[in-house]
Amino acid sequence: MIPRDGHGFPEPDKIIRAWARENGWPKLPAQGRVPTNVRHAYELAHREPVQGKAVAA
């Protein structure tokens, strides 16, 4: 379910922008939508490690 703010993402944009600037995305605009590739990189960097065997999809 997408929250009423319309974003559908749990992390506020300002947190993702700060992380992005510290991790090689210096030209990220201060306002507007955070690009999907930046958000995806943030999520990959902050996900919990998976333990056990990988499961084929």
Image (tube, rainbow, N blue to C red):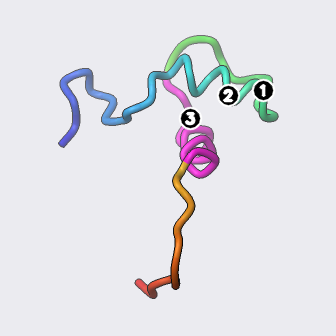
User: What residue is pinned by disc 2?
Assistant: 19
User: What residue is pinned by disc 1?
Assistant: 22
Q: What kind of residue is marked 2?
A: Trp
Question: Where is residue 38 drawn, in percent x and y?
Answer: 62, 39
- Neighbours of disc 3 within 10 Å: few (<14), some (14-19), many (20+): few
Secondary-structure class at tag 1: helix
Quadrant where the N terminus is found in the figure: top left
Quadrant where the C terminus is found in the figure: bottom left
* Left or right side of 50 for 38: right
Secondary-structure class at tag 2: helix
Looking at the image, which residue sits at the far top?
Answer: 30
> Which mark's residue is nearer the viewer, 3 or 2?
2
* Residue drawn at point x = 53 percent, y = 51 percent: 47
Q: Earlier in the sequence, mark 3 or mark 2?
A: 2
Q: Are marks 2 and 1 in contact (CB under 8 Å)?
A: yes
C-alpha separation, residue under disc 2 versus residue under disc 1: 5 Å
Residue toward you, 11 or 4: 11
Q: What kind of residue is marked 3?
A: Pro
Looking at the image, which residue sits at the far front?
Answer: 52
Residue 49 vertical placement versus 24 (above, below): below
Which residues fall within the magenta stretch?
33-46
Q: Are marks 3 and 2 in contact (CB under 8 Å)?
A: no
**Quarter of image, res 35:** top right
User: What residue is pinned by disc 3?
Assistant: 35
Q: What kind of residue is marked 1?
A: Glu
